[in-house]
Image (tube, coloured by chain):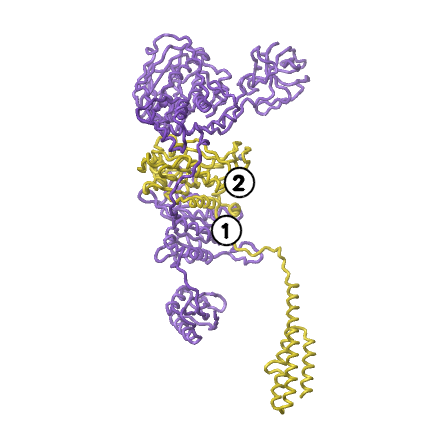
Amino acid sequence: MKASLKWLKEFVDIDFMPQELAESLTMSGFEVEGIETVGMDVQGVQVAKILSIDKHPNAEKLSVCEVTTDKERYRIVCGAENIGVGDMVPLALPGAVLPNNVHIKKVPIRGVESDGMICSEAELGLGEDSERIMIFDADATLGMGIHEYLGISDSILNISITPNRPDCLGIIGIAREIAAITGRPLKKHPSSPGSCDDRDIAKMISIENELPSLCRRYTARIVEGVTVRPSPLWLKKRLEMHGIRAINNLVDITNHVMLEYGQPLHAFDYDLLDKRRIVVRFAEDGESIETLDGIIRALTKEVPVIADGAGPVALAGIMGGNRTEIGEETQRVLLECAFFDPASIRRASRRLGLSSESSYRFERGVNIEGIGPVIDRAAEMISEIADGRVICGSVDVYPDKYVPPKIEVNTDRINSLLGTDIKEASIKQILKRLGIELKTSRKKGVFIALPPAYRLDIEREVDLIEEVARLTSYENIPSTLPKARISPVEKGRMLEVNDTAREILSDYGFFEVINYSFVAQSTFNIADIDKTEAISLLNPLSEEQTVLRGYLFPSLLETLKYNINRENRDIRIFEIGRTFEPDDRLPVEREHIAGLIYGHRYGLSWNQPKDQVDFYDIKGSVEHLLDGLKIRNASFDGSKDIPFLHPGKSARLFLDSDEAGFIGEVHPATLKALDIEESAYIFEVSADIFSRYYMPFGKYKAIPKYPAIKRDISFITDRTIEYKKIPQYIMSLDAKIIEDVELFDVYCGRNIAEERVSMAIRITYRSIERTLTDEEVSHFHSRILRELTDHFKIEIRDVESNTVKL
Amino acid sequence: MRERLEQLEEDALRKLSAAADKDIVTELKVRYLGRKGELTSITRELSKLPEDERRSLGKLTNDIKKRLEEKITTLLNDFSVKEQEDSLKSGILDITLPGRRPPLGRIHPVTRVMGEVEEIFLGLGFEVAEGPEVELDYYNFEALNIPKDHPARDMQDTFYIDNEILLRTHTSPVQIRYMKTCRPPLRVIAPGKVYRRDSDLSHTPMFHQVEGFMVDEGITFGDLKGLLIVFLQSLFYKDIGIRFRPSFFPLTEPSAEVDIRCLICEGKGCRVCKDSGWLEILGAGMIHPEVFNSVDYDSTKYSGFAFGVGIERITMLKFGIDDIRLFFENDLRFLEQF
Ligand SMILES: [Zn+2]
């Protein structure tokens, strides 16, 4: 809500700076988001008097005037014809800046030097008239800046009005609040009843309200003999400063009164109202209305309308219709001022997709008791500004009078909720300042508060407690620390897993990324989930964000692409977030951890290999993660059927028999579709399942006391034999003295048949009970060699015994 | 025999003196003093000699052996010192070449700040609770005193899945879910992603929030102030200016907006604080009686407060980031700075 300081001053004395006013409004709940100084777009233009007018020696249509600001005289070349000697005019001298950044200079015009310029309304940005020089009243002060003279110098406060305070959607409401904050009185408009035509208004218009609970009050007045024309400059300017476009004097008056009182009004051309009838009712299916914005709207029977004998003439509380619009021919005006049920107006406005200054106020709630003065003020302004003749009285349909809620207030409860020690007298004084009526109660320590009709937000005691806190100022409420019982805190396993995984992966060279939970349908499809599984947003912001993610890795591929396009080449990223799968009512949400690697393993470096990452980098990352989370019992099973992964370079991760995720090279077709040229490797695992196996405090194992003996075996085997079976088999032979089996070389290529692979493993023998002898290890080792040869048909290359005593 | 021994010593000493490096000395050591060395073989011959000759020659042999050993030790020592000196002279590296580093990784700045906020509250005895990101209208709005057709719904532009299901616009629904299953006293924070239909320099359709609440008998607005001051001082710095001003949130009453002194201009006024000298940092208030009604708490017995803080905003202020969208673009050149 924009509020002119000058206008506010009509209702309350403000003798401090706009910044100070802004500060106290902000600190009482009306945040001032900015202060705009207006009238400053015209600089250095003064009031001057024309002393003489002569013909221009070289130009038929120009004249040369001598003007004065009382201090000095100037020669001005001018083309307008409406000026005469003695006229007071706006004079712009060199240095002056006009709207649109026009800088005034001394220039010769057809051979005569002009010291400056005398201006039209249009040149000053004050109106449309560009033909004629603007002429001020004869008593204007010479040399005065014109924005000061015209009173267009003002400060506009841009105040954020919270939804609970519609009473401050008008100048008077804000002034009332300033009065309450500062303790100054609110000034009332001088009521000028004026003369009126005492014909019986009830005979001129019939008002039927079919919706008494929706339209709780409907008041109408009639003004005759109006002249519709542009508004006077001050009115146009005022509306413009408050963000409303001037239209004609009648419409401008209703808007002015709305800005002043916060109560919307509507003006109908009385002579265009069919059968001189107003009916408040729901629209009928099939009816339509062309609203003032020129749009024809089909109506349904949920939309409340104002109708005449022929059909709807306005959408109740939202916007008027074209058929009864005020125009140049209008002579008689019917003013409408009403109270509509807030929720009903909001529903209708949303249904129609149409909101206005009027609906904005009605859906928050207007002052049902304030309607009389509002419509009187509008009628009065019409008689003053549009030459109208007011018909006495009004038709006021107001069946159920406003009854304020009676709220019990308990001083102790106020103080115990706020943590204060405010005396009852102070509380009462604060409430009275807010226009709240107080009554005594028979109950001890309790009194009754009756809020005014414009404070629809005050319904219960806590609403009054807030008012007391607000006017006491939050800054004056002492800060204390809550008394709390000491209790154990737990972060939760899931959050712990997430936090630990974050540490591990970022230490391991991964960057954490955060992507939106909603993705494009095409991104969703990368994961090749059944398309019916997508959860779509009803009202997405863009095509890129329409469905909720089923997996995280498609977003990582998008992030990869984004970075490749920005020439970030070697990429290791991970994300922790939720995935969504449709279910009965709410979707199932699962926490996932996903990672992606791409490009060089070490980046560009002079002292590290320039290798590309491969499958074993992504596998190693997941192994490292599992290790860091102390998750044992993990196994990888090769899988050929994950559609978005390379069939020969992918695996499922199992924790015991729980499937916990997958790793692999992204399918070349998927990468191609995304225009990604090199291989990318991904993993995606379930943090939920991880959290079940996460063992932050596994039992300690003693450091071995006895030395180990290590023996290496180098062998050639068929590629079809999975490596993991070999150590499994060896361990199964005698887990007691075999401590570990490590793979330290894999080779295929020269000297090895195509379908074969050479490997080298190291077996660590150790007993926890005694020192093993060379002989028994050798004996056992030979058995292993035999068994491996038999079982896997491996071919032993050479046996190199390697005894390390530890 | 004596001449042979003397000749041997002379030869050995001459050769040792001429030795150019450690290897030659070691070689000579083996040649003269080794198990099959020249001196050793002479010693063996000594046993065949008569007693008195054997004794005197034996002494001589031992003396020669001692002298040779001394000479060899000295030489070896000298060579090793020299070798070390040479290696120190020749082994000079260009220490300006870049070091060998493991790949760089980073935690996202938003998660880092979120973690910081969580740690502060864990330290104050708050528990962490979570709830679904896709919520029922009931938990996100109605139970929080935001009925349908209420203008307060305009404050949070919402993404809908259907009429009743939406993406949560705040983590406050966790408040309802938690209070429905637990009784006071309680101190809880609910961190997580929230969604609003908004996108510009300072808004993204998804962002992170930490909502906190505390319910017990006798909790006051003063307590709310005190606790949030402790929080903000821990999060920023001890002397930071903090102010509380009235505001409106349907789920709390009285409601407050909490500002901190602008971190950029320290209150003088700048572009970031829109010349006010203050930065809005969080919203808070005393839990509304209607919210207690939704979870069957007796609002005449219990009171409590709730607050919500936007993590992106704090992160932006802490690091001086001026465009919120950077957080979700995930450009590595951005991420590597944190
Ligand atoms: Zn600042």
The letter of the yellow chain is B
Q: Chain of mark 2?
A: B
Residue nearest the observer in this picture, A81 or B270: B270
Asked if one can make out residue A283 in the rendered structure from this viewpoint, the answer is no
Q: Position of residue B253 (x, y in %)?
A: 39, 32
Q: Which chain is disc 1 placed on?
A: B
Q: Nearer the viewer, mark 2 or mark 1?
A: 2
One can see residue A235 in this view: yes
- Residue to which mark 2 is pinned: B320
| Chain A display color | purple
Q: Secondary structure at mark 1?
A: loop
> Dot 1: within a 10 Å radius of its alpha carbon, few (fewer than 14), some, or many (20 or more) residues?
many
Quadrant of the image occupied by residue A328: top left
Work out whether A736 lies above or below A450: below
A767 relative to A45 in the view: left or right: left
Q: Amino acid at mark 2?
A: Gly
The residue labelled by disc 1 is B105
